[in-house]
Image (tube, rainbow, N blue to C red):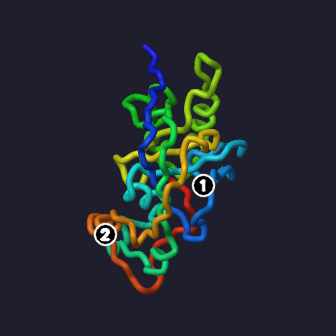
Amino acid sequence: MSIGLPSFPVDAGELLQHVSRVAYRGEPLYYGCDGTSRYDDPKKSYGVIYLGCDLPTALMESVFHKHQWLTDAKRSIALKEIQSRLVRAVGVLEDLRLADLTASGVMAGYFGLNLEQLSSRDYTHTQQMSAQVHAMLGEDHLPLFDGVLYPSRNNYPAASVALFARAEDKVKVLDDIDLIEHVDWPSFVDAYNIGVEPDPGPVDSDDDAAT
């Protein structure tokens, strides 16, 4: 029996999170189409924004996505870097339907991929998956999915959302919160053993891309 591609619903009223720069406070959400992130369109014809269901996952997929956790025991971040970041609280206005890439058997049974291909920093396979999902139509000949739910590479087994730009009217920024003021920031620092340094630390975080 062939494996179908299951969907994952995100109901209206749910809250997602996106970590960005303070310079973008009050700006519309940005859907990147430059093909540099994991589930971007390989042909650069549609935009994608990356969202977390919780703050730790949003941070690990953006601010800390290049941090060498295995080799750097200090796990530190510069205070200046913290102050340059804000968390965009993104409210879901209409139900979202995501292709569930975290479901059992989907990667191997539906897409024919293994874990190495999924987590590689060569995004060829994941971008092809994005394009395939984006092109799927339902029985009504309308787009079947608003985006994908995928395994977080940096905060596994948590999941992240890659939302297609065509769903932009279904979400809205409800608030921009300075990272240091976010209610979940202290617990993240404690749980992930993060040290805050006054001078620039080892974190390399030059974009908002999810990996």
**Residue 145 falls in image quadrant:** top right
Q: Who is closer to the viewer here, 3 or 17?
A: 17
Question: For the residue labelled by badge 1, is the local secondary structure a helix, a strand or a loop?
Answer: loop
Residue 42, by quadrant, is top right
Is 130 on the left-hand or right-hand side of 161? right
Q: Residue at x 56, y 36 (%)?
A: 146
- Camera-side residue of 73 and 191: 191
Sort mark 1 into few (<14), some (14-19) or many (20+) by Cα contacts within 10 Å.
some
The answer to whether residue 199 is visible is yes
Dot 2 alpha-carbon crowd within 10 angstroms: few under 14, some 14 to 19, many 20 or more? few
Look at 31% across and 69% down and name the residue there.
186
Q: In the drawing, what numbered circle is on residue 186?
A: 2
Which percent across, then down, holds residue 179? 43, 69
Q: Residue at x 49, y 60 (%)?
A: 175
Q: Nearer the viewer, residue 125 or 135?
A: 135
Q: Is residue 117 visible?
A: no
State the residue at coordinates (44%, 56%).
Answer: 58
| Residue type highlighted by circle 2 | Pro
| Residue 126 percent coordinates (x, y) | 55, 41
Residue type at the position of mark 1: Leu
Callouts 1 and 2 close, C-beta under 8 Å: no
For this orientation, the residue located farthest to the top is 1
Residue 60 percent coordinates (x, y)? 42, 59
Say whether disc 1 or disc 2 marks the residue closer to the N-terminus. 1
* Image disc number at residue 189: none
Reading the image, the residue beneath label 1 is 29
Question: What is the secondary structure assignment of the residue under circle 2?
Answer: helix
Q: Is residue 5 above or below residue 21?
A: above
